[in-house]
Amino acid sequence: MEQRTAIVIGAGIVGLATARALSNKGFKVKVFERSHKAVGATIRNFGMIWPIGQPSGKLYERALQSRSIWKQICTEANIWHSEAGSIHVAHHPDEMQVLHELYDCYNKERTITLFNKDQVTDFSPAVESNNLLGGLYSKDELLVDARHAIELMPTYLNEKYGVEFYWGKCITYIADNTVYIGNDEEHEADVIFVCSGADFETLYPEVYLKLPITKCKLQMMRLQSQPDEWRIGPALCGGLSLIHYKSFAAAPSLEKLKDRYNEEMSEYINRGIHVMVAQNEVGELTIGDSHEYGLTHDPFDKAEINDLILSYLKKIARFKNWTIKESWNGIYPKLTNGDTEIFISPEPGVYIINGLGGAGMTLSFGFAEECVEQMKI
């Protein structure tokens, strides 16, 4: 039997995950990317695979599956990764109350531990001890350096599965199982997956116009390598992160915490700021972030947002080197109705995967496998 063929449009994490899933189903896969390397939201994030943020059920199981795939790929491709886990710290009684409630809710199904103040500081030298009450440690979170990992993954997919990558090729039209690049180049396949992320104006714009989708701009920074190979331990999160992730809505006291934040920290809430830190292989610290929503964003970063992030971070963390090496922004698609993904077929043999929001690194591998299983061919 002749091998079935597939085309994936987009070489971000969703496209890479889809190429892998299709390859595992026996397809000969070609990936087309409009840029000459991945430069979008996939490389502009913390590099966190983050099961702790997903609610129990389908999304949490999908996150664990993705984590397992990430670990396999990183091991096979010699990509740096760290099973550092995460710790959410509390510097206020209402934050600690939420952590207690989350522990009571999840401790039987997740690998989490509730720490007191001394346990937190023993576990992570980066946590500010002043006013510290405790923390919730989770073992599940996996860290990669997104830029490095995504740069190496196409080579891995090519060597293991024979996936072919075509860089600098912008698909402008799809019809009859054929993709078109300008007026003089076309490629045919049995199945086509569109994984275009925030660029949902180019292909099937009429489909996206009917969807409750917008774009989210986030601002982030990276601090220089910490001296003397100093490590912070697990990824570090402050109390503001507790109101950001859906899994934390299980805490009965969360609404009271939100009320206090709205009253005392409205500038953070209005800009969608919650503060997290992850450390890469060479000791650099990636910090952020903020969330601004709309279909067209100002391309310029706002200094006041970065100042707010740093000001809050200095209340919950202490580092040996606070020198900012880089700052940037990223933009990803976000569904406005609370849904967590898009998987639709605009025409026979063509599928769109999108809308994972800020959880692309966490969910893409698992979700891609589900989508490939569901396709009709």
Image: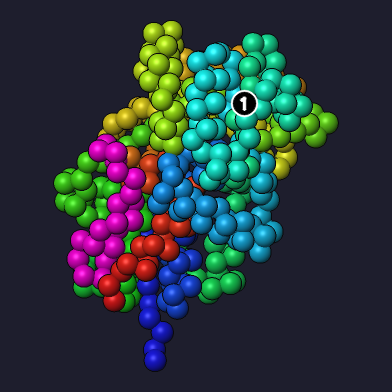
Q: In which quadrant will I find the N terminus?
A: bottom left
Identity of the residue drawn at 59% across and 65% down: 156
Q: Nearer the viewer, residue 100 or 162?
A: 100
Residue 183 spot, x, y in % from top left = 26, 66
In the rendered image, residue 353 lying in the magenta stretch gets the answer yes
* Residue 253 visible here: yes
**Residue that numbered label 1 is attached to:** 135
Classify residue 176 as left or right of residue 309: left
**Amino acid type for the residue under numbered disc 1:** Gly
Identity of the residue drawn at 26% across and 41% down: 213
Q: In which quadrant will I find the C terminus?
A: bottom left
Quadrant in the rendering for residue 157: bottom right
Classify residue 123 as left or right of residue 68: right
Residue 337 spot, x, y in % from top left = 25, 38
Identity of the residue drawn at 30% across and 52% down: 342
Classify residue 311 as left or right of residue 366: right
